Image: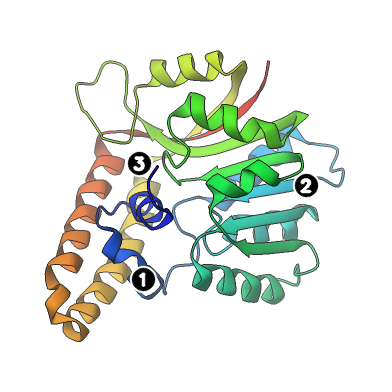
Amino acid sequence: MKSVEESVVTAMDGSDKELFPFLPYILQDIWEIGTDAETIIKLIGKHFPKGNLLHVLDLGCGKGAVSIKVAHRFGFRCYGIDAIPEFILEANNKAKEYRVEHLCRFEVGDIREKVNKLPVFDIIILGAIGPVFGDYHATLIKISKCLHDFGIIIIDDGYIDDQSDYKHPMMLKNQEILKQIDLSNMRLMEEVISNREDIKYSDDIIFDNLKKRCLELIDKHPDKKKLFENYIKQQEEENEALENKVICTTMVIKRK
């Protein structure tokens, strides 16, 4: 199993675990990392229209943007876990800013280990964290132990069109994902496909800030110039894929 540092860097589209301690600096200007909270809010509202008090588990919560906005909108209790302490600190500060600190709990930890000891939740969110638990089958089997019988799993991810010959080291074709969901005794209830123009708009903002901070780090750590240059290049390549070659989607998955 990858170290938690390797796992986090991979989720952030990097390849060198040496990047891990620099991620808080690189991403300091970005609160919403990778997942559109409004899309998730709309899906939750659709699948839980009665608005009962629900419990939400946000795995790889980053700086807490999704949990905080969900708590603010619905009054749900949200529990977020992330491996980067600085992200959790910012999540707690943002929860106070939004006046939902009584609804949100954020904790530093390795989500691969934490899920083994958690109670059940009504909603489990995996927001653009990549294959931290393995493929879809392994992921769903693992996290379903924390899911209420009538709960939902929301996954923000990308996949390759079945007719495409494009290959990505962390993405599957659509039919393979559907097959793995089925083998997990679950079914895809709904998916929202992201608009490519919206993806590009978001990517451009994130990339400009990320590149600026990487260039600052090159000035501060010239001996690590290659590390930061490679990360900039990897982000450019990943953005190109997300904007032109893969289908970005937010999926709602439920037990059969």
Give the mark nearest the N terminus, 2 or 3. Answer: 2
Occupied quadrant, residue 162: top left
Binning the other alpha carbons within 10 Å of mark 3 as few (below 14), some (14 to 19) or many (20 upward) gives: some
Q: Position of residue 84 (x, y in %)?
A: 48, 65
Q: Which residue is mark 3?
A: 196
Circle 3 SS class? helix
Mark 1 or mark 3, which is nearer to you? 1
Q: Which residue is mark 1?
A: 21
Image vertical order of residue 133 relative to residue 188, above or below: below
Identity of the residue drawn at 42% across and 74% down:
28
Occupied quadrant, residue 235: bottom left
The residue type indicated by label 2 comes to His
Horizontal arrangement in the rendering, residue 191 relative to residue 52 (left or right) = left
The residue type indicated by label 3 comes to Arg
Q: Which residue is mark 2?
A: 55
Q: Position of residue 86 (x, y in %)?
A: 50, 73
Identity of the residue drawn at 84% across and 43% down:
51
Q: Which mark is residue 99?
A: none
Occupied quadrant, residue 16: bottom left
Give the mark nearest the N terminus, 1 or 3. Answer: 1
Binning the other alpha carbons within 10 Å of mark 1 as few (below 14), some (14 to 19) or many (20 upward) gives: few
Image vertical order of residue 249 relative to residue 23, above or below: above
Mark 2 or mark 3, which is nearer to you? 2
Give the mark nearest the N terminus, 2 or 1. Answer: 1
Binning the other alpha carbons within 10 Å of mark 2 as few (below 14), some (14 to 19) or many (20 upward) gives: some
Image vertical order of residue 175 relative to residue 115, above or below: above
Q: Position of residue 254 (x, y in %)?
A: 66, 25
Image vertical order of residue 131 relative to residue 4, above or below: above
Identity of the residue drawn at 72% across and 47% down:
56
Horizontal arrangement in the rendering, residue 30 relative to residue 17 (left or right) = right
Viewer-proximal residue among 71 and 132: 132
**C-alpha gap between disc 2 and disc 1:** 31 Å
